[in-house]
């Protein structure tokens, strides 16, 4: 019996990430992935259930973990009531940067490269979570027009954040831009809704 080797599996995952990031799920080619990973195509199927199984192994953990991470960040913000928005913002930014540092490829694949897959709703999912958090944060019970506006604000924030992720900024510059985006979007939000 031949045993699966962790290093081969990891090599396939790494090459798969690069392939899906460059060409998307639909444009990704399983033969190209196998060739670049140095394994026969048939061997790749011993590790993953084809192209979809490889995508699942790459992005599902982040896709499933992201709501929990966002809620932790929101709770961090809410729990620090003694701190001003401007004091807590760098802490939030640092946590967002850590998430990006640890999962850059997966986040970008989910945001831009999963068309026609079970993950194509990723941005909508994040926007919905963000909207719900804002609705829960505002002082009064927002009416339908305010909820619609909150949804627009959330979509703008999330899509701009991912556009920042997609650019090739150094970490310091990315952190500065995320701070500015959060300040622009959320500072005194109660007064602006």
Image (cartoon, rainbow, N blue to C red):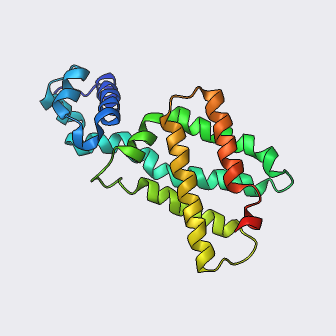
Taking the spot 55% from the left edge, 32% from the top edge, the residue there is 101
Indicate whether 73 appears above or below 22: below
Taking the spot 73% from the left edge, 41% from the top edge, the residue there is 91
| Between 68 and 113, the one nearer to me in the picture | 113
Name the image quarter holding the C terminus: bottom right
Name the image quarter holding the N terminus: top left
Q: Is residue 105 left or right of residue 93?
A: left
Indicate whether 41 appears above or below 144: above
Q: How many marks?
A: 0
Q: Position of residue 106 (x, y in %)?
A: 42, 39
Q: Position of residue 20 (x, y in %)?
A: 31, 36
- Residue 11 appears in the rendering: yes
- Residue 130 appears in the rendering: no
| Between 92 and 153, the one nearer to me in the picture | 153
Q: Is residue 68 left or right of residue 90?
A: left
Taking the spot 77% from the left edge, 59% from the top edge, the residue there is 188
Indicate whether 50 appears above or below 81: above
Taking the spot 55% from the left edge, 65% from the top edge, the residue there is 151
User: Farthest residue in the top direction?
Assistant: 38
| Between 64 and 153, the one nearer to me in the picture | 153
Q: Position of residue 89 (x, y in %)?
A: 74, 45
Q: Position of residue 179 (x, y in %)?
A: 69, 42
């Amino acid at each position: 019996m031949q045993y699966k080797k962790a290093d081969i599996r990891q090599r396939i995952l790494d090459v798969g990430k690069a392939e899906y990031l460059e060409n998307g799920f639909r444009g990704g080619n399983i033969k190209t992935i196998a060739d670049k990973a140095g394994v026969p195509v048939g061997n790749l199927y011993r590790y993953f259930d084809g192209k979809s199984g490889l995508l699942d192994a790459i992005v599902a953990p982040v896709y499933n973990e992201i709501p929990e991470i966002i809620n932790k960040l929101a709770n961090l913000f809410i729990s620090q009531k003694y701190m001003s928005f401007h004091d807590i913002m760098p802490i939030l930014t640092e946590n967002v940067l850590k998430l990006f540092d640890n999962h850059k490829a997966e986040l970008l694949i989910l945001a831009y490269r999963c068309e026609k897959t079970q993950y194509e709703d990723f941005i909508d999912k994040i926007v919905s979570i963000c909207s719900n958090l804002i609705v829960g944060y505002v002082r009064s019970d927002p009416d339908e027009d305010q909820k619609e506006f909150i949804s627009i604000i959330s979509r703008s924030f999330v899509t701009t954040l991912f556009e920042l992720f997609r650019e090739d900024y150094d970490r310091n510059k990315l952190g500065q831009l995320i701070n500015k985006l959060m300040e622009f979007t959320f500072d005194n939000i109660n007064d602006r809704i």
